[in-house]
Image (tube, grey):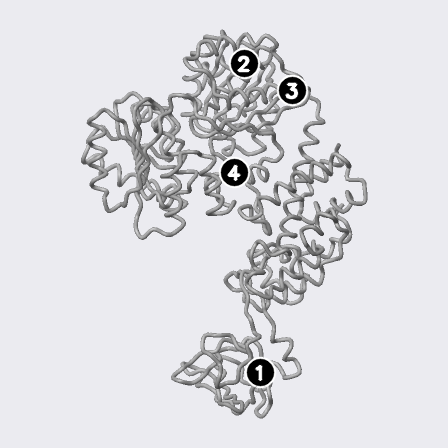
Amino acid sequence: MRPESLFPLFVPVTALPGVGPRLAPLYQRLAGDKVVDLLWHRPSGLVDRRYCPTLAEAIPGRVATLTVRVEAHLPGDGGRRPYKVRVADDTGFAHLVYFHPREGWLRELLPEGAIRVVSGMVEGFYGEITLPHPDHVVPPERRAEVMTVEATYPLTAGLTLRPLTRAIRAALDRAPDLPEWLDPSWRDAQGWPGWREALRRLHAPTGPEELGPDNPARRRLAYDELLSGQLALALVRAHLRRRKGRALAAPSQALRAKVLAALPFSPTGAQIRALAEIDADLARPAPMLRLLQGDVGSGKTLVAFLALLTAIEAGSQGALMAPTEILARQHFASLEPLAATAGIRLGLLTGRDKGKVRAARLADLAEGAIDLLIGTHALFQEDVVFRDLGLAVIDEQHRFGVHQRLDLAAKGHAVDMLVMTATPIPRTLLLSAYGDMDYSRLDEKPPGRTPIDTRVVPLARLDEMVAAVGRALEAGARVYWVCPLVEESEQSDLAAAERRFADLAEVFGARVGLVHGKMRPTARDAVMGRFASGEITLLVATTVIEVGVDVPEATVMVVEHAERFGLAQLHQLRGRVGRGSGRSRCLLLYATPLGEIAKARLEILRASDDGFVIAEEDLRLRGGGEILGTRQSGLPEYRLADLASHGSLLEHARGEAEAVLERDPDLASPRGAALRVLLYLFERDAAIHTLKSG
């Protein structure tokens, strides 16, 4: 049950004065449907009303608070001419200008002969001072109310600042005094206010510096939000670790030894380290949940395969799941010779498998005649039954939801899970998105990977690029040509790709192929197969699909309108070349004029091929919201924290959450009770249920 102290915040926004059924949908769209959501709706700017000149001194273009005498009402004609109210002081006169007002209301607000305090934007009109639709008109005794600094907020169509500000103030009045959940010495060392005072200051900035992420009130509230997330993840981790699992150990590691002996190279230090961490997890009698992240070409698949061999040697089966059929078949083709070396039986299951072939494969799986099954989403289906699934590996984990991960784990008893991603993730995002997992990082490239020569070229030189591609094709190279992201629509991306395909086919004829997300998987596989075999040598593609086939002969990557792509996405695309011994190039074509962030992004990519460095820079440039690209999901959204600015707070929050649960695993102490309130405040209710379920 949510604590009673939070009841006033967890009611519909319609509980606030002035928020009726007509405006409620606008508030919901802007911030959320509960009162608490308005507390997290941060100011984006401010209006300083403390400038109070005489009319002669008033500077057009500034907000001013003026004390004036109302001289005359000059009604408009109800059409093009506005309603004016002439006002004056000892130094001159001005006009307050209103469009389509109610005359009776205006005469009551501004009686002729009365003194009024008026605040608004001063404008100059043909040498005359005007104030169109002043924000405030009050009697002199209320002058102090107006002469303040006012916060301004992001708005949505149909909702203006004044009613939103009133609603936020009403929400602040409902904010209760809550028990302090922060360690007092840590809070004092940071110079932070209490929770309620921090909220008040957040919504009452007195200068531009108080709008930034380093304002103590904002940092306090950001830390609260981060701590709630890290505490929730720590509770889930502790719950997972308490679950009964089974140890998967292969003391002799005979299967692994056979494969390592057959490899033409030695594993990197990073691969050996990651494998040791996975082996330690497998040997524990608790289910493993580990993220293996590595740059393009860092050798994740080999690490996963060697881990699967441990599970197989321990007597269980393994599963390797990929997001696309192309990738699943690529894994099968690359692992088949290694499986033969180890003497284990490999199976492949995709949506294409039907009838007797599928039935026979499923029968082999259920009987244990298949040691390792590689497949796509087809692995989730109800009729896929393992004799004894011990370890499941999920490749490109961001393409699968948590529920799909759990569905695969349910195919066996206490299944160990290893999830992999080729998208390097900055440490702060790793802590916030994958904090329920342990993680290993492959930060070395295997020997033999050649550096990729990356060049940034204006689109105006497109004809030169086409000619350069022609020379590369004549020299025997294979080339990817990736078409621009037009908008978040497969259809628009496809139209761009089809136009470029037609243009290039006119020049290079039948050597050009096209792949895109609207093609049937069999047709797409056929084109990719023809590219891999060399029947076609120039592949035009959209980014919607996984261009994940390993073609060592592909040595040129052209990305059109590279300024429209995220850094992580560009780095992934570049990683499709440089896989063989040939010298590889990546040409990033951009349209002018180039914005500052786009220019910085392309420069970073040109200067570095380290995916982890690139990911950290991407976070710095864009913040956490889009770091993994719009087509990838799973990152939490923060209302108060900014991971680019508050990364050190996230690190501290993770350590604090672990320390708290070590001392007080059930959150039963007075501080534990306060931390439960924090979890409910930021709607981490699921973590509370985990706590209750043990």
Drawn side of residue 384 relative to residue 662, left or right: left
- Across and down, in percent, residue 421 comes to 50, 30
Mark in the foreground, 1 or 4: 4
Drawn side of residue 574 relative to residue 211, left or right: left
- Across and down, in percent, residue 284 comes to 67, 19
Mark in the foreground, 2 or 4: 4
Q: Secondary structure at mark 4?
A: loop
- Under mark 3, the amino acid is His
Residue 419 quadrant: top right
Mark in the foreground, 3 or 2: 2
- The answer to whether the residue labelled 3 contacts the one labelled 2, judged by CB atoms less than 8 Å apart, is no
Circle nearer the N terminus (2, 4): 2
Circle nearer the N terminus (2, 1): 1
Circle nearer the N terminus (3, 1): 1
The label on residue 426 is 4
Q: Give whichever of 602, 289 is nearer the camera.
A: 602
Q: Is residue 99 above or below residue 501?
A: below
